[in-house]
Each structure stands twice: as C-alpha cells, then as structure tokens.
C-alpha cells in the first residue's frame, strides 16, 4: 500500500514518511507481514478450546475431534469474542465503582463527587430511599452497593433495566436474553463454550447477545454514569484535534487508554502550579496534556483537553519525536508503542496492574495516592524534556477546532428541557433519522475513509450523526464537529442544527458512552410509546477491529438497533451463524447486522432502513 492508501490524513501521512526514515515499524507494516491471514481463523472455523485439537473444520474434515461442526465452532469462538469485549467495558465500569467506594470510605481526597445532582437522580432511579434529601455519603454508598451487585450472581436482572422500554424487556424475557449480572453472563459464556456444553449455535448466540446486553445496559452504563458523577457530566465546549495539538515548546504528555480515573489525575497534576514552575525551570513553555483514543474522549468531553489522535495515530504521535511521555491505562494500547517510544526519548508509563507492558515504567495507581503518583509521572515527563532531540522533531498539521461535550443531559438542556423539539424535528422529516457511528480504525481500511465517507453521506441526507470512540477524532479532523459543518448537511439538518447552534455530527464521548446513545434511544421510544426497534435510528462501525466493538454492535442489535459493520466478524465459516446475524436476528430482536465495506453503499442501506421505519411509524 502507498502511504496515501494507508490514511486519509496529512498528519498521518507525514508521520508515516518520518516513521520510514526513523526506522519505526507501524501497524500497517505488521499487517503486510501478517497478510494473507489464516483462512480458518478468518472464517472462525479453527478451534483451540481443548488439547484433543486444535482442529480446523473443512468440507473434508467437517467435525473437530470432539465432534463439533462448523456452526458450533464458529458460535463458540464468536461467543468468547463477545465475552472478551463485554469484560473489557465492564471491568472498566467496576473500576469506577471502586473509586466511588474509596470516596465513600474517605480513603481518597483526590477524587470527589462532582455531579451530586446526577448521583441523586441515579439513586432515585435505582430505588434508594431518600435519594434526593439523604446525606450524600449514604446515598453514594447505597448506589455503590446496588451497582456492585450488578456484577454478581444473585440478581434477576441488571439495575438499569428500568431504562429499557417495556416492549423491549418483554422481547428479552421471551428469548431468555434479559441480562442478569455482568460477571455471571461472561462466566456463563466461558462455561457454555467449554467442550461438551452449548452445542447449538443459535443458543450460544442468544447468550452472546445476553452477555453483550450486560455490557451495554450495565458494565458500560455504569462506567459512563459514575464517570459523570465523579468527574462531571459533559457539557458543550470547544477544543482541538489532530497531531498539531502536540506543542513544540511544551512538555508533551499523551494519555492513552480508556478510564478517566488515570487521565483526569494526569490533567490535575499537569495543572498544578508547582509542576508548571518545574516545567518552566526545565526550559519548557508549559505542560501540554493531550489525549489518544477513548481516555482522550473522556477528558475531551469533560475538560476540553485536545485530542492528538485515534487508534492508528497512537504510534504516529510518538513518531513526532516531541512526546515526553505516553501514559496508559488499558485497552487498545498497541504493545508496539513501547518499541516506538524506545526509538525516541519518550517514556512509556503504565498505570494499571491488569495492563502491564514488559519494559515500561510502571505505577500502580491507587485512589488514595492517585494525585501524588500522577505528579511523579508528570515529573518524569518534565525530566525527559531536556532529552528531546530537536533535530528529530516534526509536528505536522495545524490543529482543527471542534465542538464537544454532548451528553443526554446536555442535549436535553439544548432542547430546553424536553425531547419534544427533537421528536417534532424527526416527525417533520427535518431530521429524518439518527445514526450512531462508532468504533475504531483498522489498517485493513484506508484510515478513516469509511468513518468520514459514511458520516458525510448521512448528514447530506438529513440524518443526524452521533459519534463516539475513535470516529470522534476522524469527524473532528474533517471539520465535521463544528456548527459551520451544517454547510455539508441537508436542508433539514441545516435548519435544526443551525437553530440549536450545534454541529450536524455530535460527539457523545468514549466507547463506554455508547450507553448514552442506547439510553437516548430508550428515552425517545418511551416518549413515543414504541419499541427501540420501531425508531428511525441505526448504528454503524465502519472500521471496527476490537472485541469491544463487536460487543457494542451486538448489544445495539439486541436492543433493536439495525447495525452496519464495515467488515464481518470471523463467522463466515458457518452459514447458520452468518444467516442468524444478517437475517435471523431480525425476527427475534427486530434488528440485525449488515456488512458493507463501501461507505456510500452503507449510507444507502442505513437510509433505506430509516425510511422503512419512518413509514411504519406513519411519518
Ligand atoms: O474503546 S473505538 S480502537 S479506543 S475499541 Fe479502541 Fe475502537 Fe478506538 Fe476506545 Ni472503542
């Protein structure tokens, strides 16, 4: 692939050229080495679940040693894939409960409850007595206990199930899909996929959906809601995006990973006057914290901290040669970053015991000592500033301005406190529908071409786009997260977004914040007295790569949202599983997956779905 074919962006292309000169290997290089991929793994027909195997299923060898056929093997592999993704988001959510516990127990002063009103609102929703007037610590403790219990076994259903429209709950109930405890569904998925358990592909897939629902309506939702409680609920603000946010004159610290528990402390430490004085004493013009991937989305939405890049920009950010430290927590952190950092003066700093990288500087960040530890990390970055080699620095591109900070609360606020204006705009066809475009980069695609192609095609058709995760950075770089981007939208969106002063592409946060989108869909469905599957809404992940993205896709579908993927998961080796994903789920949960790599064709499919839903609603 030429450099132009690898990425849509000038900042990426410049850094790909520099990486070649500097001898830094990137994901694109490794993809080339790994291509062609193992066909059995691609089709999902290889099984490594026991040591009678490993087995490969083919026409000539239609069963593994245990007797499992392609359908069973593919379903088992996909089930475990979904369990992995659900575990990632949900363990992230649990870490926030632990921080809330540390606050409640008085073990930390570094974290506080920033959005008391939201905590009380959630407490009321969860049935906590005296949620509005009780002592804050007692209310917080009660919420903590209820949410901890969401990870256990002795539950009939997860705590936020009350947010799900009744019609949807009835569908789940009839299918045995109602999510109980997060850990329970994940453990049961591992159990079912052990040799000799669930040998019915459809049954395994139903449980995969239940596991994914436990992610969306519990693990991720807890992650979002408690992050808002502890760090504040996002509200609209301006920021900037792309590699140009790296500052030549300053100590540059990039935070990467997912949980705001670490990145928020790094931001706080970098703003500490003493640390700033030390940076100046080291000859720097200040301390610049910028984000990568989803923890970047967290501090972008809440604090307006600039975003350096999405998934495939993480290595390239280091290639600028101007980064003193990359501070990571967990998920989506390429192990290669350690080698890339080693080519420059960049320190690679890990902060979570569950995400260690051999050779990295490690801090086991704990709530009680988080700020002091974050200051130590910032000090390491300041110390690194003098080691930067100016000859090897190249910062490409000028930052692009963006508008960020949309949450359901912020949307309601912008609408004057009720969803009615939004529903009226949808009914009048000014907003014909809403699509959440979410997820990743994958070097199998030209970086962000699918993300941007689809976003532009939809807004032209008066379909409002909500973005999260790595699509945020893509949309931002393309100038689509600014109110003036309504120029590129259809007349209806121009009118509505113009009147509200919001962009036609709305940043809704990180990947766990897809829970905001399903919650919003549930609120709209309730308001209209219909099911989520009746709404003119859809989801898409044009360039997805991860287990987590698959879990998001599956909880969207199981929640009734038609979901487009730019490439299929590794299931094509089973016609039965593939047919269920693309067709059969429609009759079960009222939505299915559709796979289409071409963004314009994908836009046609999503538009057609929206048109049919509008028609069915009499719109
Ligand atoms: O959780 S979008 S590449 S960073 S998996 Fe990862 Fe995909 Fe980015 Fe956020 Ni989500």
Image (cartoon, rainbow, N blue to C red):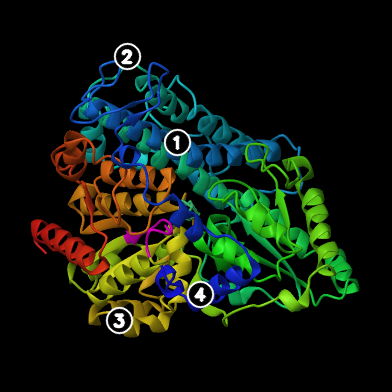
N-terminal of the two: label 4 or label 1? 4
Specify few, some or many for label 3: CA neighbours under 10 Å numbering under 14, 14-19, or 20 or more: many
Q: Which residues are magenta?
A: 436-445
Dividing the picture into quadrants, the one containing residue 267 is bottom right
Image position of 330 (left or right of 490): right
**Disc 4 and disc 1: Cα gap in Å?**
33 Å
Q: Which residue is mark 3?
A: 494
Question: With 588 as the anchor, is 332 left or right in this view?
Answer: right
Residue 13: mark in rendering = 4
Q: Position of residue 197 (x, y in %)?
A: 32, 16
Precedes in sequence: disc 2 or disc 3: 2
The residue carrying pointer 2 sits among few (fewer than 14), some (14 to 19) or many (20 or more) residues within 10 Å by Cα, namely few
Q: Is residue 107 above or below residue 65?
A: below
Q: CA distance from mark 1 to mark 3?
A: 41 Å
Q: Could you tell which of marks 2 and 1 lies nearer the N-terminus?
A: 1
Circle 4 or circle 2, nearest the eye: 4
Marks 4 and 3, how far apart in space? 33 Å
Q: Are marks 4 and 2 in contact (CB under 8 Å)?
A: no
Point out the image quarter for the N terminus. bottom left
Residue nearest the viewer, comparing 67 with 380 = 67
| Local SS, label 3 | helix
Residue beneath disc 2: 196
Looking at the figure, which quarter contains the C terminus? bottom left
Toward which corner of the image does residue 375 lie, by quadrant? Answer: bottom right
Q: Secondary structure at mark 2?
A: loop
Q: Nearer the viewer, mark 2 or mark 1?
A: 2
Q: Which residue is mark 1?
A: 84
| Mark 4 or mark 2, earlier in chain | 4
Foreground residue, 611 or 317?
Answer: 317
Residue at left 52%, top 65%?
235
């Amino acid at each position: 692939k030429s450099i132009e074919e690898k990425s849509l962006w000038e900042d990426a292309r410049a850094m790909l050229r520099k990486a070649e000169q500097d001898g830094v290997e990137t994901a694109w290089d490794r993809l080339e080495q790994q291509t062609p991929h193992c066909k059995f793994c691609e089709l999902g027909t290889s099984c490594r679940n026991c040591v009678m195997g490993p087995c490969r299923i083919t026409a000539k060898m239609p069963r593994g040693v245990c007797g499992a056929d392609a359908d069973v093997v593919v379903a088992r592999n996909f089930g475990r894939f979904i369990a992995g993704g659900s575990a990632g988001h949900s363990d992230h959510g649990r870490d926030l409960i632990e921080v809330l516990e540390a606050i409640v127990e008085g073990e930390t002063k570094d974290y506080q409850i920033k959005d008391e009103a939201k905590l009380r609102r959630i407490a009321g929703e969860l049935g906590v007595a005296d949620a509005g007037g009780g002592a804050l610590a007692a209310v917080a403790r009660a919420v903590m206990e209820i949410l901890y219990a969401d990870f256990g076994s002795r539950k009939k259903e997860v705590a936020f199930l009350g947010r799900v429209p009744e019609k949807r709950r009835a569908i789940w109930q009839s299918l045995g899909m109602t999510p109980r405890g997060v850990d329970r569904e994940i453990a049961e998925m591992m159990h079912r996929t052990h040799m000799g358990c669930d040998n019915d592909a459809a049954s395994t897939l139903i449980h995969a959906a239940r596991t994914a629902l436990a992610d969306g309506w519990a693990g991720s939702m807890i992650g979002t809601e408690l992050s808002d409680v502890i760090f504040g609920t996002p509200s609209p603000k301006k920021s900037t995006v792309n590699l140009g946010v790296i500052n030549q004159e300053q100590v540059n610290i990039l935070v990467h990973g997912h949980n705001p528990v670490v990145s928020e402390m790094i931001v706080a430490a970098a703003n500490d006057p003493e640390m700033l004085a030390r940076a100046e004493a080291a000859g720097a013009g200040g301390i610049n914290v910028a984000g990568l991937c989803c923890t970047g989305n967290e501090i972008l939405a809440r604090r307006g901290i600039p975003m350096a890049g999405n998934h495939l920009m993480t290595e390239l950010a280091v290639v600028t040669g101007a980064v003193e430290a990359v501070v990571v927590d967990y998920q989506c952190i390429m192990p290669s970053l350690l080698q890339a950092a080693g080519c420059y003066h960049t320190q690679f700093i890990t902060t979570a015991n569950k995400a260690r990288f051999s050779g990295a500087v490690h801090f086991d960040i704990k709530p009680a000592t988080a700020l002091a530890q974050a200051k130590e990390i910032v000090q390491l970055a300041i110390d690194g500033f003098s080691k930067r080699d100016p000859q090897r620095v190249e910062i490409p591109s000028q930052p692009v301005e963006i508008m960020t900070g949309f949450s359901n609360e912020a949307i309601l606020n912008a609408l004057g406190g009720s969803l009615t204006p939004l529903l009226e705009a949808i009914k009048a066809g000014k907003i014909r529908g809403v699509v959440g475009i979410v997820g990743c980069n994958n070097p199998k695609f030209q970086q962000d071409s699918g993300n941007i192609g689809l976003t532009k095609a939809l807004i032209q058709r008066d379909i409002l786009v909500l973005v999260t995760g790595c699509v945020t950075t893509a949309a931002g770089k393309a100038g689509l997260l600014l109110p003036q981007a309504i120029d590129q939208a259809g007349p209806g969106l121009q009118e509505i977004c113009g009147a509200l002063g919001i962009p036609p592409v709305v940043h809704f946060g990180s990947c766990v914040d897809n829970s905001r989108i399903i919650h919003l869909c549930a609120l709209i469905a309730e308001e209209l007295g219909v099911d989520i599957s009746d709404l003119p809404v859809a989801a898409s992940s044009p360039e997805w790569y991860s287990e987590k993205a698959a879990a998001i896709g599956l909880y969207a579908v199981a929640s009734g949202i038609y979901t487009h993927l730019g490439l299929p998961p590794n299931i094509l080796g089973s016609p039965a599983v593939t047919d269920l994903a693309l067709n059969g789920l429609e009759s079960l949960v009222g939505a299915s997956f559709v796979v289409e790599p071409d963004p314009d064709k994908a836009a046609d499919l999503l538009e057609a779905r929206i048109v049919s839903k509008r028609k069915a609603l009499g719109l």
